[in-house]
Amino acid sequence: MALSKQRTSDFAWVQFLKWAKANDYTLLECKPYNSVHQVHAPGSAHYDDCRHDGTTYSMGVDINWPSGGSEERTMLTRALPVAQSLGVAVTYALKGTAGSAANHQTHLHADPFSVSNLGQGNFEQPTGDATASRMQAALRFDPRQRDNLFGSLSRKRGSAVRMASRMHGGKHPHGIAFTQRVIHAEPTGVWDEQSMGKHDRAVSRIQKVLDLPRTGTWDEATEDRWQAFLKEHGR
Ligand SMILES: [Zn+2]
């Protein structure tokens, strides 16, 4: 067993691993990507497992960037807000080499437990959640883009579905073809039956993330929850 309490859900943890894998990071000492060696301290997170969607995942990972060097530092630094938004604890010598960060200057350790260290000593990892990445999945982002940081492209894709819905298919601030790509319809540029059907299913996926009945219609309850979602998760 790991030495500290699990702070984020198995789902959020696996989401982080999938994001890192899809973005071409090297994931070491972590099942199912590779095997875990008996080189870690007793009680290390690497020795714990969780089961998610029929796959066994280790509860610790050591992340590298294939080319190393200064590019590695840039890329590992880029992974930090993704991990932390999901409540994933990280050890990496970003701001110094205090404590365990001394051994984490060329790789980043992550786990779903509670202690982070960015180089200035241990601190309690704040809780995160994976709602924004679930919304990104509902908006048909590919796994590489599901960073749980609901930035401008996420807002743009969300607003395409919202505006199409509120204006009954009559308004597309980013063009009809853009909306069609977000809802996985053929990007023909013509709003047809197929677009309407796929659009309703997109609204229904969004409603599921917002914990609402899946009516497929962007009603006032959907609008209220969407605005609250943006306030909480938008960047
Ligand atoms: Zn590690």
Image: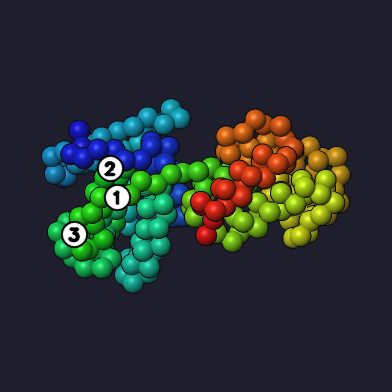
Relative horizontal placement of residue 229, taking residue 216 as reference (left or right): left
Q: CA distance from mark 2 to mark 1?
A: 8 Å
Task: Say which amino acid is labelled 1.
Answer: Gln
Dot 1 falls on a residue whose secondary structure is loop
Relative horizontal placement of residue 75, taking residue 213 as reference (left or right): left
Residue occupying the point 43% across, 27% down: 54
Q: CA distance from mark 3 to mark 1?
A: 12 Å
Residue occupying the point 73% across, 56% down: 178
Tags 2 and 1 touching, CB below 8 Å: yes
Q: In the rendering, at what x and y percent does residue 121 appear?
A: 18, 59
Q: CA distance from mark 3 to mark 2?
A: 16 Å
Residue occupying the point 79% across, 37% down: 197
Tags 3 and 2 touching, CB below 8 Å: no
210, 52: nearer the viewer: 210
Mark found first going from the N terminus, 2 or 1: 2
Q: Which residue is mark 1?
A: 125
Q: Which residue is mark 2?
A: 113
